[in-house]
Amino acid sequence: MSPFWDTIDTMLQLRGGDYKSFALFGPVHLFWLGLCAVLCTAGFFGFRRLGDRGRRRVLAVLTLLLLADELLKDVSALATGQFVWQFLPFHLCSINLFICLWYTLRPNPIAAEVLYALCLPGALAALLFPSWQALPLWNVMHLHSSTVHIMLVLYPVLLLGGGFRPSVRRLPAVFGVLALDTAAAALCNHFLDTNFMFLRGSYGNAALKVIEQLFGPAYILGLLLIVFAVWAVLYLPWTAADLLRKRRKKI
C-alpha cells in the first residue's frame, strides 16, 4: 500500500514508535503554521467587511469543508482497512466540528463561546504540537490533520472578526460542554480501549508529554490546570477592557 494512505498507527508499526517524518518547527511544520497565520489574518479582516448574508455563506462553506475533511479521514481509513475506534469523533477537535455546525445552522452566543474557549486554543495547540509527526507531507492523514485544525482555528477567528466578544460570564456553560465531552470520551476510552481527548496519556503530543512528566499520576489534574490557565490568558484582555469601559462611563 502506498504511504499516502498510511495512518499514524500503520506508519509507527512500520517505522518504529519514535519515528518522525517531519521535525517540530521544521520546514513542513512552519509551512502549515504560516498558512494558518495568513488565512486567519486575511479571514479576520475580510469577514468584518462582509454583510450578514456573506458571513453566513462563508461559515456554511467552511462548515461543509470541515465535515468533508472529517469524512475523508474515515472513508480513506475504512477503504484501506485501517479504521480504528480512535477515529470516532470524540476528540475535542472532532466534537468542535459539530459546534461549528450548530453555530452555522443556529448562531448563538453559547456556541460562539465554546468555539473561542475550547476550539480555538485546542486546535491551535494541535497545530503547534502535532501528534501526526510520523506522517509525511504527502499523506492523506497528514493533510487531513493539518487542514482540519487550520479551519478549526479559522472559524472562531472569523467570529471575532464579525464582532463576537467573549464573556467570562458564559464560561460556566462552556465548562459544562467540556465536562460532557470529557465524560463521553472517558466512557469510550473505558469500553473501546481508546485515548480520546488524551485522557489516558500524551500519545506523541510534545506539549502533553511535558504535562504527563510533570504531574505523573495527577496527569488529569494537570490538564485541568492548563485549561484554566489558558482561559485566564484568553479572557484577561476582554475582562480588562470591560472594566476600563465601566470606569470611563462612571467618569
Image: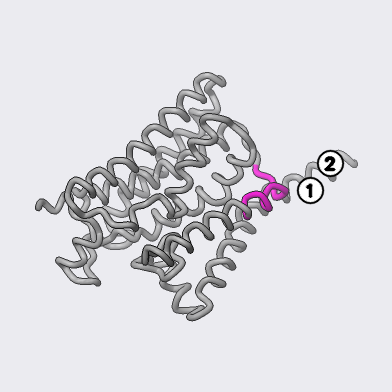
| Image location of residue 131, percent across then percent down | 34, 61
Image point 45% across, 28% down: which residue?
60
Q: Which of 127 and 12 lies nearest the eye of the viewer?
A: 12
Real-space CA distance between mark 2 and mark 1, rounded to the nearest whole angstrom? 9 Å
Specify whether residue 19 is painted magenta.
no
Q: Earlier in the sequence, mark 2 or mark 1?
A: 1
| Image location of residue 232, percent across then percent down | 64, 58
Instruction: Specify few, some or many for label 2: CA neighbours under 10 Å numbering under 14, 14-19, or 20 or more.
Output: few
Vertical comparison of 72 with 142: above or below: above
Q: Which of 138 and 216 lies nearest the eye of the viewer?
A: 216
Instruction: Specify few, some or many for label 1: CA neighbours under 10 Å numbering under 14, 14-19, or 20 or more.
Output: few
Q: Which residues are magenta?
A: 166-175
What amino acid type should be assigned to the residue bearing mark 1? Leu
Specify whether residue 168 is painted magenta.
yes
| Image location of residue 13, percent across then percent down | 18, 67
Q: Is residue 79 left or right of residue 89?
A: left
What amino acid type should be assigned to the residue bearing mark 2? Arg
Q: Which residue is mark 1?
A: 243
Does dot 2 land on a helix, a strand or a loop?
Answer: helix
| Image location of residue 27, percent across then percent down | 27, 54
Q: How is the image coloured?
A: one colour
Q: Which residue is mark 2?
A: 248
